[in-house]
Amino acid sequence: MSYLDYGTGSRIADSKAPQGPIAERWDRRRFTAKLVNPANRRKHTVIVVGTGLAGASAGATLAEQGYRVLQFCYQDSPRRAHSIAAQGGINAAKNYRNDGDSVHRLFYDTVKGGDFRARESNVHRLAEISVQIIDQCVAQGVPFAREYGGLLDTRSFGGVQVSRTFYARGQTGQQLLLGAYQALSRQIAAGTVEMHPRTEMLDLVVVDGRARGIVARDLVSGEIGTYMADAVVLASGGYGNVFYLSTNAMNSNATAVWRAHRRGAYFANPCFTQIHPTCIPRTGTHQSKLTLMSESLRNDGRIWVPKKAGDPRAAVDIPEDERDYYLERIYPSFGNLVPRDIASRAAKNVCDEGRGVGPGGQGVYLDFADAIARLGRDKVAEQYGNLFEMYERITAENPYEVPMRIYPAVHYTMGGLWVDYDLQTTVPGLFAIGEANFSDHGANRLGASALMQGLADGYFVLPATVNDYLAGAPAVGDADASHPAAVAALDETRERLARLLAVQGDRTPDSFHREIGELMWEYCGMARTEVGLRKALQRIPEIRAEFWRRIKVPGTGAEFNQALEKANRVVDYLELAELMCLDALHRSESCGGHFREESRTPEGEAERKDDEFSYAAAWEFTAPGQAPLLHKEDLVFEYVHPTRRSYT
Amino acid sequence: MKLTLRVWRQKNADAPGAMAAYEVDGVSPDMSFLEMLDTLNEDLIVQGEDPVAFDHDCREGICGACSLVINGDAHGPERTTACQLHMRSFRDGDTIDVEPWRAAAFPVVRDLVVDRTALDRIIQSGGYVTAPTGSAPDAHAVAVPKPDADHAFVHAECIGCGACVAACPNGSASLFTAAKVNHLNVLPQGAPERESRVLDMVAQMDAEGFGGCTLAGECATACPKGIPLQAITTMNKEWLRAARTSKR
Amino acid sequence: MSWTSCGWPPYGRRMALATRDRRPPTVRTLWDSSVGKKTVMAVTGLIMLGYLVAHMAGNLKIFFGADEFNGYAHWLRHLGAPVLHSHWALWIVRVGLVVSVVLHGVCAFQLSRRDIKARPVRYAHTKARTSYATRTMRWGGVILALFVVWHLLDLTTLTVNENAQAGHPYENVVATFSTWYGNVVYIVAMLALGLHIRHGFWSAAQTLGVGSAARARLLKGAANLLAAGLTIGFISVPVAVMTGVVN
């Protein structure tokens, strides 16, 4: 049976979501959730994988509540998780500006921004909690930007009409993460969190249908061990690195979520990928990752390409009437400020026409000449100076004199493990929080919402819902590392790594990663077609077969071996890529970050098909290489009614 | 460009290490320093040799993972992290020395990778505000004067890379510790633990085997985030104040 | 229940955290800490610096002739009279200085040992510019310690001063600076003193937390002035003897 012949399983429903008025649902759920007696909490162990915003905040909060926490990260320190790289800010419906913001407005903006593919209940809860997050972070000493009166400053962000984004210069993610890291550090010192840095989760241990532990490898000694617990929380981030080049950290990976998927957790909307329009273009085949530049640049920069394909002239030599300011031309009312997905696709289109600029024709100009003429160089430097410096450091070009070159890049994955309202996956006792789950952003994430979701899940949602699970979970201590299921998971992992080391072929892990990444970017990137996706689905198993024939991993498994770590991650990318393509193929509509060439309006814009696709696609793993099973979760919109997004 | 690299190779913490020379050809000036190391590693793997181990992650200059001493300078000749250092800072035919951070508190794990958990333990000893989740008052309950907020931010920018320790002739972590003390002690939220924080963090810094500060100033020169040397003076002042007044 | 199948040392607990529930007394806190020891060095350094300023000023009396200089020396021995007995004030100062020198030296030794231990492996690619101040302080300190010993044997106990006569300091000074080695030892030591004060004064200000960006110029200026003033003041005496201005 071919991988494409997926079956459709029973519909899936979010059994934990409370009913009633949307503004009361979270309170209601918190009240109905069972509690664990404080004296009994220390008898429960919870594993948290990852130390980003979601993981660090969850680990710290669970430990504060009295649970015993085992926390893992692959980095040398929990402070280095990739949440640290988020620049812009964090949304909260504080309405400190008195500009008409409210919880309901943040809820509305997020559901609409997600192109009506997110759950209303979850998004409303997120908007409610956003307010508490700011309070919590300020109490921890996060140095948000302040005004002269000493109160918090806010700014507006793409696609909304209120000023609700709190920020700490261009390093909001760093400051929020350090706040959570410090809270976690306090618990580590108190002995309530046992931290395992440089330790990577390689498999999930499921005992009698419940998540009871993980298999993890100490990256320094190479030792593979089993860690047992009463619940497992995955906060391991997104899977954007399937594309090889992305704005993710080099070592961010999909292994934790993919292994959980293989052990029974459904994977929802894997094809929903966000591609950010303003990244620094690649310079050559040596490129290892892409660097994002804040979206705010589009406020004053004008985007253009030459009218003539293959124009060899330098930007400054191209006269005004031979330039195509294509966003202003196609979308006169929004101009350069169209949403991320639209801007990204338009850039791809002009480059496909051969009008791209820079090496390989993969770039468009972002020109500040007009802004400098209008505002003066000093004013521009004041607003964008640090971004201009960053650009110049990387490209050695001075953006005050020559236009910047930008190109879209993979940035965030809205898809992830399917979770219910309690953030629990389809494996009882296995929770997924932050970017690792699929819950809140639908088909497109708004700017400054990722930080909000990570912290909402970790500080407030998960700690409340884990109680409910543990209160009803089987007696403590009935599973240990000698359980046959744990031993089997450990053996399988050992075997997999041994196999990788045994091939001794002639290609490096990176060469395969680059190959699958390029394939995905080509066929499952900004614009997807049935023909292309079918081609990719045919090619992926071939690459996978070649991988297992030709992979070369030097050294042994019993030492610090970065090539082995990388190879093992590529194994999982090669499987996840296939599911992403299948999901993209099955969803023959365009919505948010998922654009199918076949589904567009007469003007060429994305066309959603609510009759057919108003559901979350949750995929069930069947067997290696075998077609998965699709479960649909219907999305119901009671408060925000789906409309078509138009920006022309 | 064609370069000669001399890289510290050391199999593990217990094995002896030595500098080893490699020729790297076809280096583009647009490559970052780490991408140049990537190309070397790709060649080494195909030849069946162990690639050079080095820490790296975000490659945007913010996670603080990269930790290379390049030609005797922590993070190399430019004031940035090694991941943001580009090969255009070097010339064709150059010989470049690449070494790990050197400090007793940072044992080598392998090649250019060192163990920096000592810095985490300094934070664990007091580099936080005790604010359990759910206990926070409204964010506007306490106004923070903008100069104080800015002072806190400048010091909160520390990425914990350890370049200050690597550059210090005494292997001191004073700048790292001082950055956190400055960040939290200036804020009203950090005030209740002001004394215990600085006393405990300095004590932990000493216990980890870092050297003391002789104000050589190398740390502030090497810091990719520009944490000022003055931070150490302020930490000393806080420490003396705490030593005099702390009663707990 | 076994938590894990392998017992690695858990991170964060490899070394007991130094956090204490009860704080020891301030003196203990000072002595146990690298910052505290630096404070001891700063305070004792400033005490010695104050003494040196007075000492140098007194030395300059040599330019007013033997009677005045010897008279000054005589007055010193009776300082504080009639409340204090003869020599008492001098002994109080001496004890204060010995305590300062010993504390300063012991702290310097212990801190230096800690610093050297903290950087056991050198970089293969060395840079000369590093640790100028550190080297100056460490070697300068050692030179000064040796000098103090010689200086006391020379002009206080008169042990190594061949033509010395007790109670005739003016003549003894002239005798010392009439030998080439006397001049060399003294001048080298005073140059070392200048460098030591130049970094030491500024460093003490930072250790005591009085330095700030606004005061940086003031402190560096004061350090330079003190260093230059003391060096020139002290060296003027042997120069005067050599050139015959004082004989």
Image (tube, helix red, strand yellow):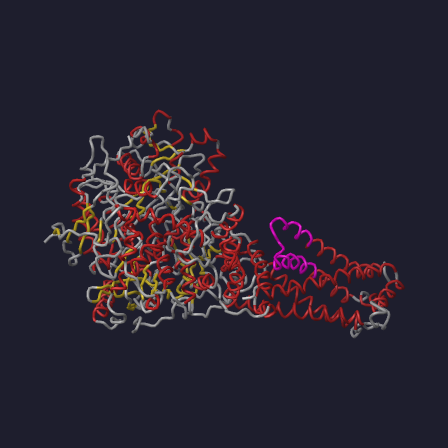
Residue C132 at x, y = what percent? 60, 58
Residue A640 visible from this viewpoint: yes
Q: Which corner quadrant holds the N terminus of chain A?
A: bottom left
Name the magenta segment's main secondary structure: helix
User: Which of A421/C241 is in front?
Assistant: A421
Residue B15 at x, y = what percent? 40, 70
Residue A434 at x, y = what percent? 31, 53
Q: Which corner quadrant holds the C terminus of chain A?
A: top left
Query: Is C220 one of the magenta-colored residues?
Result: yes
Residue B4 visible from this viewpoint: no
Q: Is residue A492 left or right of residue A288?
A: left
**Tally of marks:** 0
Residue A443 at x, y = what percent? 25, 44
User: Which of B231/A427 is in front?
Assistant: A427
Query: Is A406 one of the magenta-colored residues?
Result: no
Looking at the image, which residue sits at the far top?
Answer: A321
Q: From which residue to which does the magenta span run?
A: C193-222
